[in-house]
Image (tube, rainbow, N blue to C red):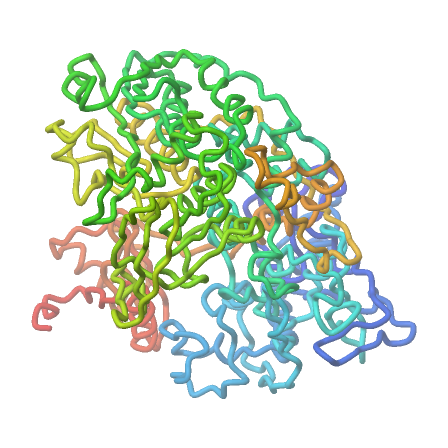
Amino acid sequence: MVNLTIDNKNINVESGKTILEAASELGIYIPVLCSHPDLKPFQSIELSPFIYQGEIKIENDQGAKIEDIRGCGVCLVMDERSGTLLASCKTPVEEGMKISSTDESVLKRRRENLSKIMADHPHSCLTCAQREGCIPMTDVCPGSVVFNERCCALLGKCEIQKVADYVGIAPETQRYQFKNLPIVQDSPLFNYNFNLCIGCGRCVRVCQQVKGVYALGAVISNGKLKIGTTIGPHLLDSECKFCGSCVEVCPTGAIMDKKSPRLSDLCDLVPCKTACPGEVNIPQYLRLVSDGKLEDAAAIISSKLTLPGVLGKVCFHPCETNCRRNELNISTDAESDSINVRWIKDYAIVHTHLAKPSAPKNTTGKKVAVVGGGPAGLTAAYNLYLKGHSVDLYEKEDDIGGLIKFGIPRYRLSADVIEKDLSRIKSTNINFHFNKSLGKDLSLDNILNNGADAVYLAVGLTKSRFLPNFDSSNGNIKYGVEFLNDASKNKLTDDYFKSKSVVVIGGGNVAIDAARTALRYKADSVEIICLEQFNEMPAYSHEIKEALEEGIKIRNGWGISNLKNNNDGTNEIFLKKCLNVFDEKGRFSPTYDETSNESVTCHNVIISIGQEAGNDFKDDKIIQKLMVKGLIKVNNDTYETSVKGIYAGGDIVSGPASVIDAVGAGRNAARHIDLYLGGNGEIDDEGSLNNEYNMYIGRTNGFNSQKRQNANLVSAENRKENFSPVEITYCDLDAVKEAGRCLQCDLRLHIRHNPTPPKEEYLTFDEINMVQLPEQEGVIQLLDNHKEIMVIKGTENIRETIKEMLGGGKEYSYFIYDLDPMYTKRESELIQQYLQKHGKLPDSGDDLDDLF
């Protein structure tokens, strides 16, 4: 250990630490630019033979070494024993050192060094008197600065701006001259503006040292450090992995995210995870699969998903739609570049054995009734059980599963996959009550009177919507939901449609499932007729593609005007041309050309135009009170209905949705029900999960050109003959290869940031602090107890104004003051800043404000 003092504060630190690190431990701020807490010192940069800035190739000066270049010089401190100025970021501590970070010679040299940097960096915005209320990069500049000489869109959120505010920009700083360096905006995900680069090398160091990718490099040209791509003009040329680390460490706007100047929200940084209704940590389990740690990956998945195996087969993967790999634009297909997340999930679950869930450590004595054993109900019940609540689940069928067991065809979701998931849920102490239909066998009154402290309604939409004015007694007409239900219960013979032609009406997932199921019941031909054009069909695109491969025809853009039952047992369907499915506001409101007609003759019709709630609970007064237009109305945040303690979720709330949406609804409802019952609302215990990560991702030649490992399917000719699963789970090689395509966007969240300069100290609004104030010009800001600004006021005498306000009868808690002889200018700046943030003017502390 080494003993030293910094700014008269004593500290013992480990030998080998720098002065900067010691100061940080003391809470003493020292400004830095080239230094970063996750990076080695500036002179650890490995120089490249050449780099590219856009199309410009820049070679390293012959014999030039990184040691020839000094760092930023703004972290200087003084050794008071010798009067020597030292770079705190690289100078190791020594026994007995006496360091000053505030000596006037230190402050002066910092300003001089920063001035040299600013001479090559736009800084008019940083010295502009109007900057506090400025909206950056707009057409009108309040300071009349030429556009090319302005700062960037990071104004107000820029690290170099904060350092400049703290260190100060010397008046003698040279005026910036625009150098017209390349601005690269045609690379994926990030934009580069080399005019804003200060040569700190942080982006290069993170790319070399932390990530091991070497897509960015540095050379010394004409005695200055220049940054650029290493192989060619674009990041794609240089095998960039687009992890975003360079953006995260850049102290200026030289490297910025395309979507916004600096991404900070999780939904932008890790869109796959935030798009997942199940909230699964997708990047983490992809990493684990890539590393061969399947058990750990499966644990991550099943910690969030009550039905992990089912979702490995049927999740509609919104994560893939939002995957940032899509933005690399390698392929013309909008979805083809995303990571095949669902298939990797399926691989992990198929190849592992999930342990039975542990019983809750504590019981709460609270009782919850869940009505409906589908995905939403099972998810809520399972999570509430794990929280220690007693759970009764009521299901109208003779088994749990809902849609996944009694609606999804077996070629998509096999019985063994379903049972693997359901058996884990059944192994709990949830009390299952089968063949109990709400409205028929039990009512909400019964449930509430039976001691339930809370109720969750997840009864689903179990009935097909009928076409109006059609004879539903016609035996050749079936409805999608009921037809698939009969198929799942083996109520139909294997050759049910043998030698028959079948027409399916509808363009959604139920229609596609019904059509493909009819084909497997030996139909001679199957045709789908729907209102939507091909690119408007609500069914999943891969399901449509597979249906077409199996020989199913789709007739797009037609509505049904009539249906006639012929004497020979066939049906004639009369069609009318659909002009538009939706109105100008996006609402379902079809319009037709009644003069454009066709007709189709077939043996059987399956109508799949939507779903609605069943009739069983139409007489339950409480539920009818909750229903609005066929759905239960809830608070969108809490899932609670208008009746306290009764919650609802799934299709009965949202309308027809996916399994993963239902799982997400069940998770969120469980949180709020637990809170309602006195819990903390935390339904995830991730303490036992493998959350390890490695920031080093390495260089992979051809990484960006790696194509998505698409689904392996049984051939169309073979699969349409039976109900065997059409998908073939990934082999080990394909799974590891596909998981390795992930950009690992989440690792950016683990990069630290340099400390920001200390904020202004808030003084308590009292006489003790008032008497110590200077009697000089300046601006005061008065704050409430939440430290929200209430008053901004310029004054010729700060002490006298605070004294007057102390006796003014108004309640303030804190104040800040700025000494400024041009206090009216400073007052105007602060008011502009307040207006920009709050959209209204602050109080000025005068009663005259009422006049305005």
Can you give x and y, in whole percent of width and height, for residue 94 in the image? 75, 44
Residue 775 figure quarter: bottom left
650 with respect to 702 (left or right):
left
Instruction: Name the residue nearer the viewer: 382 or 95.
Output: 382
Q: Nearer the viewer, residue 715 or 446?
A: 715
Res. 79 in view: no
Q: Nearer the viewer, residue 166 or 362?
A: 362
At 31% from the left and 16% from the top, the residue drawn is: 392
Which residue appears at 35% of the width and 14% of the height? 432
Q: In this view of the protein, can residue 598 be seen by the observer?
A: yes
* Residue 622: image location, x then y, percent: 13, 29
Of all residues, the one furthest to the front in this rendering is: 568
Look at the picture and state if 394 lies above or below 837. Answer: above
Q: Is residue 154 above or below residue 265?
A: below
- Nearer to the camera, 402 or 175: 402
Specify the quadrant that holds the C terminus. Answer: bottom left
Q: Is residue 629 above or below residue 164?
A: above
Say which residue appears at 76% left-offset and 65% top-offset. Answer: 238
From the viewer's perspective, is 718 left or right of 520?
right
> Percent from the top left, x then y, of residue 809?
11, 53
Q: Quadrant of the N terminus?
A: top right
Q: Position of residue 302 (x, y in %)?
A: 53, 28
Direction right: furthest residue:
63
